[in-house]
Amino acid sequence: MAHGNAPAKAMKGVMTERTHQTHESEEMTDEDKFRIMKIFSEKIVPKLRKLGARTGNVNCRFAGPQYRHWLIHFRSKRDGYQITEFEYDPNSGDLDLDL
């Protein structure tokens, strides 16, 4: 395999508002994103507020085991949090936010 493809390979699995690249074997639909954003707002945002989080990433397993290899990147925004990116990571693990 040629080394000239390394930057393109590094981007696989990253989904942002500007790009829609996904891992070859995984895809996240708009319906998946909506489901994750809804559950993130309901279950995760209160925990992030309690922890005083400003920016970071969270494994999406909270939305169901089918999302266990997906991460969301978030940042605080005025009175809440904004998801800035969806990323596929087959090695990601979840973290219990009920500290």
Image: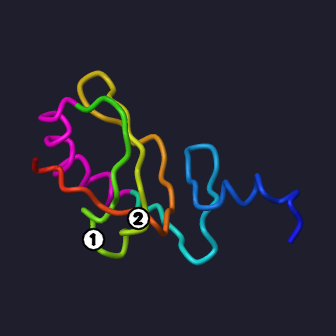
Q: Which tag is nearer the camera, tag 1 or tag 2? A: 1
Three-letter amino acid code of the residue under disc 2: Glu
Query: Seen in the image, is 62 located left or right of residue 29?
Result: left
The residue pinned by badge 2 equals: 31
Q: Main secondary structure of the magenta part?
A: helix
SS under mark 2: helix
Query: What is the quadrant of the N terminus in the image?
Result: bottom right
Three-letter amino acid code of the residue under disc 1: Gly
The verdict on residue 96 being magenta is no
Residue that lies at the very extreme toward the top in this rendered image: 78
50 or 80, which lies in front?
50
Q: Residue at x 33, y 51 (%)?
A: 58
First along the sequence among labels 1 and 2: 2
| Other residues around mark 1 within 10 Å, as few (<14) / some (14–19) / many (≥20) | few
| Other residues around mark 2 within 10 Å, as few (<14) / some (14–19) / many (≥20) | few
SS under mark 1: loop
Query: Seen in the image, is 85 located left or right of residue 51?
Result: right
Q: Residue at x 65, y 60 (%)?
A: 12
User: Residue 32: horizontal and vertical position, in percent?
Assistant: 40, 65
User: Residue 2: horizontal and vertical position, in percent?
Assistant: 89, 66
Query: Seen in the image, is 9 located left or right of residue 97?
Result: right
Asked if disc 1 and disc 2 are in contact, CB closer than 8 Å, the reply is no
The residue pinned by badge 1 equals: 64
Q: Is residue 45 above or below residue 64?
A: above
Span highlighted in magenta in the image: 34-52
Query: Seen in the image, is 45 located left or right of residue 78?
Result: left
Q: State the mark number for residue 86.
A: none
User: Residue 53: horizontal and vertical position, in percent?
Assistant: 25, 32
Q: CA distance from mark 1 to mark 2?
A: 14 Å
The verdict on residue 42 being magenta is yes
